[in-house]
Amino acid sequence: MGDPRVPGPSTYWIDAVVQLTPAVADQLAAGTSSAGAPQVVEDLVVELPAGPWVGSVELDRTLSANGVVRLAPASGTVVLRSIGEG
């Protein structure tokens, strides 16, 4: 991944654990279904709540151009993983 005309890598990788307000978490949870736990870099694993986790194609599209989003509605935590080229 990258542009051969540019020196160095141009790939980006973002793993984020974000605490939402209850109202926003409830809004994002609409239309989701059960999903597996998110995969994140090892340093962020301790930041993840126990779950359960939900996800959807619409949630992915809403919060990420090319990534995977998981939501733990009980704790209002959203986890985003996005990998792409800049």
Image: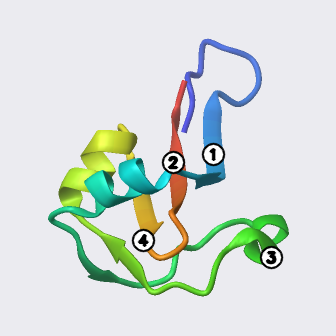
In the depicted view, which residue is nearer to us: 13 or 27? 27
- Left or right placement of residue 42 versus residue 26 in this view: right
Q: Secondary structure at mark 1?
A: strand
Rendered view: 6 above or below 44? above
Residue farthest toward the left in the current orientation of the protein: 31
Which quadrant holds residue 68?
Answer: bottom left
Do callouts 1 and 2 mark residues in contact (Cβ within 8 Å)? yes
- Callout 4: 10 Å neighbours few (<14), some, many (20+)? many
How many angstroms separate mark 1 from mark 3 (CA)?
17 Å
- Callout 2: 10 Å neighbours few (<14), some, many (20+)? some
Do callouts 2 and 4 mark residues in contact (Cβ within 8 Å)? no
How many angstroms separate mark 3 from mark 2 (CA)?
19 Å
Q: Which mark is residue 73?
A: 4
Observer-side mark, 1 or 3, equals 3
Q: Secondary structure at mark 3?
A: helix
Observer-side mark, 4 or 1, equals 4
In the depicted view, which residue is nearer to us: 56 or 18? 18
Q: Which mark is residue 14?
A: 1
- Disc 3 marks which amino acid? Val
- Callout 1: 10 Å neighbours few (<14), some, many (20+)? few
- Left or right placement of residue 64 versus residue 75 in this view: left
- Disc 1 marks which amino acid? Ile
Residue 18 image position (x, y, % from top left): 61, 52
Tell me which numbered mark, 3 or 2, is placed earlier along the sequence.
3
